[in-house]
Amino acid sequence: MEGRILPLFVAIPLAGAFLVPLLSKLWSRFSDLIASIASALLLGISIYSWLIISAAGVPLHYWVGGWRLIGIAMWFDALTALVVFIINIVGFCATIYSIRYLDRYTSGRWKFFTLLLLLIAGLNGLAISGDLFNMFVFIEISAIASYALVAFGTEEEEVEAAFKYMVLGEVGGAILLFGIALLYARASTLNLAHLSQVLAGMGRTPFYWFVIATLLVGFAIKMGMEPFHAWLADAHFSAPAPISAMLSGVFIKITGVYGMCRLMFNVFGVSRLETPAFFNLLIAFGAVSMVLGGLLAYTQSDYKRLLAYSSISQIGYLLVALGIGNFWGIAGALFHIIAHALAKGTLFLAAGSVERQAGTRNLEQLRGLERVMPATTWSHIIASFSMAGLPPFAGFFSKLFIIIGALTARMYWLAFLAALFSAVTLGYLTKVVNLSFFARKDEPPTTAREAPALMVLATLLLVVLVLAAGLGFKGVLDHLVGPAAKVLLNGLEYARLVLGG
Amino acid sequence: MIPYVACVLLFLIGLYVVISKRNLIKIVIGFSLIEYAVNLFFALVGFKKGALAPIITTLEQVRMGVNRNFVDPVPQALVLTAIVIGLSTTALMLSLAMRLYEKYKTFDISEIRRLKG
């Protein structure tokens, strides 16, 4: 079915990014207004498009300029719907949160919103792109915006983190481009569907594996997988809180995991039965990330650095779940993308509120925040429970699906490891709660007031979704995650749908 | 074959510079080498020996359909885009390096470690 709505996913944030610097000269608050409207519109059209495809049962497509295979292709199937929804819900919350959060910076409001909209434009563009080179361009758009946003505070640490992040991220980008050039040299096409047919005709040659390896290294750097994790903790630690929420919750999963999944499953056509080596590799790297990230998180005394290491651990979960490769594994991975994006978004926004109100985020110095900032505290606690996989929150079901997947694939040690590191997650997150949010009897709480209403609202919106995705897990599984998992499992079906439609 | 090997060598030299050099500006130069290597490789992919530039100049060519003796124009268009992306990343990297110099008064990356990461 033709989807004339698809170009809007890129056009709205780009138009917003153009208007913000222009109109904020007239009145500085226009930047808040435009960014909020743009992100609300994006959230609206992502839900609308999802309703269309789930009602019609067929994906949306759009050929820019009508050039079909030689032009730019846009594609919106169940997997895109999931990814776009996550981008825009966290993007919307980060935007309205930023309106008050930015008061702590003296200038540059419009720069922040311009870059945030560019970040969202890049992520949305990547999600709907049906063309290899466009995927690369959109990855770079969002990546460049994210480097600048990490350095937004222009303090020593922030610039240092941004530089390190940028060097590693751009090397990753260059490796991706190299992989794309290799692929084009053989296949002479960039359209993902056409590429998948050409590759299917070529067989599993050494060239095929070499291209997979090249692209995997590129994506591994983008997602902060071990052993390429060094940039992640610094960058997510130094960025402004709403940007940390976008980076940890969305960016690493979309540019890294979604990009990899789309190419590997739908273009290279990997499957657990035919190419077990690929899946075992994912499990190996995933397990290492899960263990190391979790253990490193345990030792941190800074609130945001702890959360950043925890993201590495959760990326490990995702890779392990993808590596299991059966329906429950992949559905678990996709459910985990949703659960982790919402919960980690909440945690970073809560961390930002604490830092803004209390003036520090050192866990040793914060005391008894429960009494002075109840809404933030309870948001934090619920999101922590979800991350740790306690019922009835979203994180419980994603981990449950992953463990079911591991058990049905007879990988008992993996199920054990996943369950064990749920407990570790609970451990380091309750450490935060114990130290900072609940006071000991004899100690007075840190002097702070509850965060401004808009910031609390953004945090609460994400928490409510964590709860809703947990309580309504059946609906999420049937309408969002299940169809998306089927897109990945029937990898080569993608080419047939695109070229037939 | 030799140009391809040269590309890979250039890529590896760039990677070596990025990993081993301690001066921020040299790291940026190393990154530029990596980028040029990839761009060159991409442009080489579309190259055909003795072929013409892919520009249709006469009506005759239009009537005859696609002239098979053209080099592939797509990689050139893509490399152009990649160069623009490279320009913006280099500019941003250099401006970050400048900011770092302002803060730390040095370009030596081993002295720039306020983060204990």
Image (tube, rainbow, N blue to C red):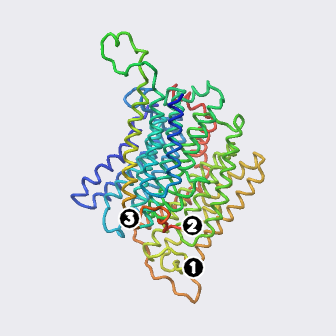
Residue at mark 1: chain: A
Tell us which disc is closer to us: 2 or 3: 3
Identified at 62% across, 73% down, the residue is A431
For mark 1, what is the residue? A438
Tell us which disc is closer to us: 3 or 1: 3
- Asked if residue B35 lies left or right of residue A271, the reply is left
Q: Quadrant of residue A323?
A: top right
Q: Secondary structure at mark 3?
A: loop
Give the alpha-carbon distance from disc 2 to disc 3, as whole Å. 22 Å
The lab-note entry on whether marks 2 and 3 share a chain reads: yes
Q: Quadrant of residue A67?
A: top left
Question: Which badge, 1 or 2, is on the more N-terminal residue?
Answer: 2
For mark 3, what is the residue? A154
- Asked if residue A339 lies left or right of residue B40, the reply is right
Tell us which disc is closer to us: 1 or 2: 2
User: In the image, residue A486 lies at what x, y percent?
Assistant: 61, 39
Q: Secondary structure at mark 2?
A: helix
- Is A45 in front, or is A281? A281
Q: Secondary structure at mark 1?
A: loop
Q: Quadrant of residue B97?
A: bottom left
Residue at mark 3: chain: A
Q: Disc 1 marks which amino acid?
A: Phe
User: In the image, residue A120 lies at what x, y percent?
Assistant: 42, 50
Identified at 56% across, 41% down, the residue is A215
Question: Which badge, 3 or 1, is on the more N-terminal residue?
Answer: 3
For mark 2, what is the residue? A306
Give the alpha-carbon distance from disc 3 to disc 1, as whole Å. 33 Å
Q: Are marks 1 and 2 in contact (CB under 8 Å)?
A: no
